[in-house]
Amino acid sequence: MTLLRLFRPTPVLATLALGLACGDGTGPATSRNNPGTGSSTLEVTADIDANDDPAIIGGFSTEYFVSVRDGAGSPVSGASVIIRNPSLPGGQITLPETGTGTGDYQLIGNTFPSGDFRLDVAQGTNNVAGVVVGGPGVHNITTPVKDDTVAVNQPLLVRWTVPSKAKSAELETRDFGPITLPDTGAYQIAGVDNPARPDQRIRVFRFNEVDMAGGLLGSRLRVKVRKTVEPIIVQ
């Protein structure tokens, strides 16, 4: 599979990223979801996955990936696949097919745009249109923080910010989880799941998802944002 990069790491993008990687919208992200419309002839599964990466200028590796299939499950090639977001350069991106006949469309970016995401897919008379998933914004893990020392075999309280409440959250460490949670901004890991370790890592994922009204069964648009804190010293 060919991976196409949406952005090149430049000093300008490093500055731009500060404006993009923030929360947007008020109320729960799910309140801004829109199932859209369509011909009900395509199965479209779309993922926007943003993983924090301090080695990347912009701070994230964000994959935009859309799979398009027909009613028989065969790849739909040559489709127009457009994702819109006001914080994207030009307000939208067009995802190229990863290879002729694959029916898979992909781009990789190095920021995570604030705001909501709209998806439009068309191939001839087949389409899904106006599907919107509310962006949950970029959270931060506030407790514990990098290089903190915490007590071994004692409950460990993890806190994170909630810019716009997501449909669900997920928490994991090197010794615990992943566990699916409501996006309340806090969870306490039991002492039994907090063993001694000099290099503990905490990750919090936040998700939003919408089913597509105009697609075949299983069609959906999902966004995921991951943030990491490490190392945590447990002793």
Image: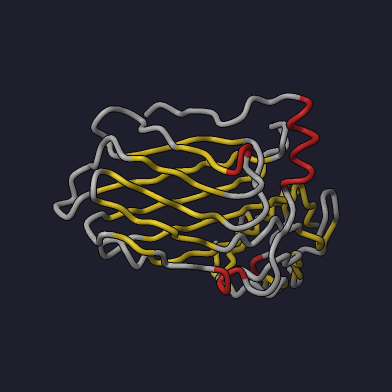
Report the front residue among 86 and 22.
86
Left or right, 136 with reference to 217: right
Q: How many marks?
A: 0
Q: Position of residue 233 (x, y in %)?
A: 80, 52
Look at 52% across and 68% down and name the residue there: 33
Q: Position of residue 82 (x, y in %)?
A: 45, 44
Measuring from the top left, give residue 108's x and y in whole percent: 53, 35
* Quadrant in the picture for residue 207: bottom right
Viewport quadrant of the N terminus: top left
Q: Residue furthest front?
A: 125
Quarter location, residue 154: bottom right
Residue 219 visible in the snapshot: yes
Tell me, yes or no, if residue 172 can be seen here. no
Vertical side of 152 occupied by 90: above or below: above
> From the viewer's perspective, is 54 left or right of 167?
right
Q: Residue at x 57, y 74 (%)?
A: 31
Which residue occupies the extreme right position in the image? Answer: 148
Q: What's the residue at 70%, 55% (across, down)?
A: 138
Position of 227 with respect to 62 (left or right) is right
| Residue at the left extreme of this rendering | 72
The residue at 72%/71% (across/down) is 185
Quadrant assignment for the C terminus: bottom right
Q: Nearer the viewer, residue 43 or 130?
A: 130
Q: Is residue 147 left or right of residue 2?
A: right
- In the displayed structure, 151 sits above or below 145; it is below
Locate residue 17: give its quadrant.
top right
How far across and how far down the image is residue 83, in percent? 49, 46
The answer to which of 128 and 154 lies nearer the viewer is 128
